[in-house]
Amino acid sequence: MRARDLLHTRPEGLYCPPGDFYIDPVRPVASALITHGHSDHARSGHRSVLATRETLEIMALRYGADFAGTTQAARLGETIDVNGVAVTFHPAGHVLGSAQICVEKDGMRIVASGDYKRRADSTCAPFVPIRCNVFITEATFGLPVFKHPPDSGEIARVLKSAEQFPERAHMIGAYALGKAQRVIKLLREAGYERTIFIHGALAKLCDYYESQGIALGDLQPATVDSGAKTDFAGAIVVGPPSAFADRWARRFPDPVSSFASGWMRIRQRAKQRGVELPLIISDHSDWDELTETITETGAGEVWVTHGREEALVRWCELNGIAASPLHLVGYEDEGD
Amino acid sequence: MNRFAELLDRLVLTPSRNGKLTMMTDYFRTVEDPDRGLALAALTGDLSIAAVKPAMLRMLITERMDPVLFGYSYDYVGDLAETVSLVWPEPDAHLTANSQPTLADVVGALQSASRSDGPKVLVRLLDRADISARYAIIKLVTGGLRIGVSARLAKQALANLGAVDVTEIEELWHGLTPPYTELFAWLEGKTERPEKTAKALFRPVMLSNPVGDGDLEKLDPADYAAEWKWDGIRVQAVCEGGVRRLYSRTGDDISPAFPDLVEAMVFDGALDGELLVGDPVHETGTFSDLQQRLNRKTVTPKMQQSHPVFVRCYDLLQDGTEDLRALPFIERRVRLEAFVAKLDPTRFDLSPLAPFADWAALEDMRRNPPHPVIEGVMLKRRDSPYLAGRPKGPWFKWKRDPFTVDAVLMYAQRGHGKRSSFYSDYTFGVWSGPEGGEELVPVGKAYFGFTDEELRQIDKYVRDNTIERFGPVRSVRADRKQGLVLEVAFEGLNRSTRHKSGVAMRFPRISRLRWDKPTAEADRIETLQALLD
Ligand SMILES: [Zn+2]
Ligand SMILES: [Zn+2]
């Protein structure tokens, strides 16, 4: 079987003709396989959805219990037959519940990575490289300039700044699903035991993570009721990045604006957003991790999607691996 | 090196002055000699390292990576130093573990490299450094840290470290050299204040306070002398034992940019005055003309010819071996008159006193100065000694009223720190083009002058009338029918080639919100252009 007969793009997303399903479709379809709960991958309104239990639960939290006609939970590592196509979910290390989806028929195996990262994250299961014929990789940070430093150093900078400016609130922008919980967890792992204040948009997901056994310590809503302006002096506040441009942010004393994202590697990006304390913490692979993963999968062919395709395609070319960009539209990750 | 690199990173992104000061002071407190002194020199621009050209840097990196991948990277990042720091091959872990170079290692290696060795030495350093250290190293060798820290601010951080007045640091500064070990030892209370050994040192400048409401009523006009406040830059010209230096108000040595003036500095003493363009007798040029001569390291003979400079003298601080600063103003003035009379009249003249009968008469003079390059009057107590800093009482400045223009709000940008959730930085424009085809051209930016309540009102207006957003900037509805008119006050105009409008405002601020005024009645660009001539 040729790869393109097993999976190819359609306006709705990546389609598998023999299995008659889509992976992470951007429009409502009859049958959807979903890698993870970020809103650009997991949309509501499909007739049936196959995803990990956590991803299904996260979708229910975000869209309401009736987000799909029917749902089926996929267990990591277990193969499911979908119209004669063998489908297996493997951990992707991106956010809680995230998975790569491996589809196989007649000796042709394609792995769709979804979004993935390689470094340790105690809020989700680690990525497992799967040998395959074709590897579909994301390329959110697919440029050699993206090199994520160790998380510990980034967290240490927040803590140092909080010490240096005890009269100011430190506001960390972090996407609601995955990044926020990871940042909080990293703070805890660095020994930060004080209350962390969170924006209302994070509450449900933080509670959900807690319910899955991921301890986040004492979290309080960052509401004005919880105190006067000065009560947030020296506090760490976590919220979705968009909230910091909002009137919401006015309740904090002279805030130090921080943002946890792989984009923060580029100074100009930080500057443009008015970020004073950039934290290079990403839930995606950096350049070296992308290229190492491609090598590890042993794939003879790579399809690149979701970001800066051209550089990764070029790297594959230089390394004798067939590669082409998959021009999928509609993915702009909320979780970078 | 890493602590210096981290300091640079934080300084670039920290908008507030106090935040920057805290970071620098903490750095000076925690980092040891000689690294902190070298960092200080790098910040004040006193570190000399042979430069590596951008083309060389580009060659070095493309020898090490695929040029196409480098091209994609550079295209994305936009800054050569940053791109190279990010894509440079990572050192082996065993090389970096214990042997990250210190700032002293880096500076030492770079300073001892010959011109032809420079690139090789740079490579060896980059091969052992991590990303942020690589960035700092490249910034050092390509010149220009450009991190929004002035030499003055770095000196203020030192002053904070030692709890001394910044003028004390400025006074010592030119006698000291990197890595400033004796300066730090003094600031930390370990030794005496360093001796002033160098010649022609800077003397901290005496500054004035603006005349406030009701200030003058309490004062007797007879106690004060008045003179014109010229619109140039305040300088101090010092000559001692053959050493000649021209200093800015904050003690930066700007002599190299003014060889024409320095050549005429044939005296022994220290003069305080205003640097202006033109010649004293026939023509005093505008600040806009003077700008042609500012912020240059060197100056062409042609520029010296077309834009000659001179000093209009205000005060005499030192006459030969005699320090005059403790004398009353009026006595210094007599000495000054005698002193200036002996100097080259094409390069030095006296700022005349402006006699006045009472405050009302002075007010009239301030409002209608006799020369366009005068920006108000100065009041100096006749008995005032020359004191460092800005003491309250002896000297006042009373500026003429600012210019104002009615402009239309075009863009708003989110502020920083306390204002990060407010659209508080405004770009405004005036009309240009033929009747019926008018367009707004931006003429300036302002982020103060309004009250907190007005800020809230403008913020709401911006949010309700946004037509486009890019990053932290919103473009706001502004056409002939709809928009917000701002009355903008400013001190003067410069010609500008960087701005599409051809003008740049000095010290613009929002003086009034004109909710009542239709946008079509805002000013036209010709109104501003007329001010330039
Ligand atoms: Zn994604
Ligand atoms: Zn994602």
Image (spheres, helix red, strand yellow):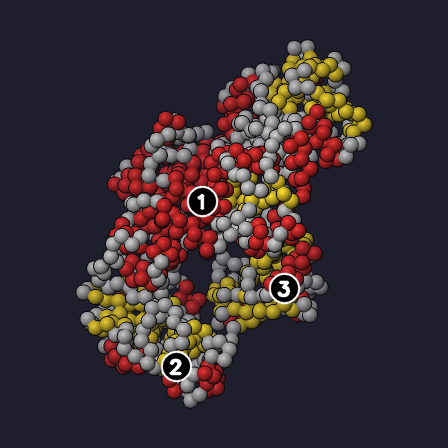
Q: Quadrant of residue B226?
A: bottom left
Q: Position of residue B5 (x, y in %)?
A: 40, 42
Q: Quadrant of the N terminus of chain B?
A: top left
Q: Give neighbour class at mark 3: few <14, some 14-19, many 20+ (Cα, 10 Å).
A: few
State the SS at label 1: helix
Label disc, if present, on residue B226 of the rendered structure: 2
Identify the residue under disc 1: B9
Name the residue type under label 2: Ala
Instruction: Please determine whether, in this image, residue A12 is positioned above or below residue B191.
Output: above
Co-location on one chain, circles 2 and 1: yes
Q: Earlier in the sequence, mark 3 or mark 2?
A: 2
Q: Earlier in the sequence, mark 3 or mark 1?
A: 1
Residue at horizontal 71 percent and vertical 64 percent from the top: B481
Check whether the beta carbons of the residues at disc 3 and disc 1 lie within 8 A of each other.
no
Residue A74, percent from left and from top: 70, 20
Label 3 sits on residue: B453
The chain ID associated with circle 1 is B
Q: Is mark 1 within 8 Å of ligand 2?
A: no
Same chain check for tags 3 and 1: yes
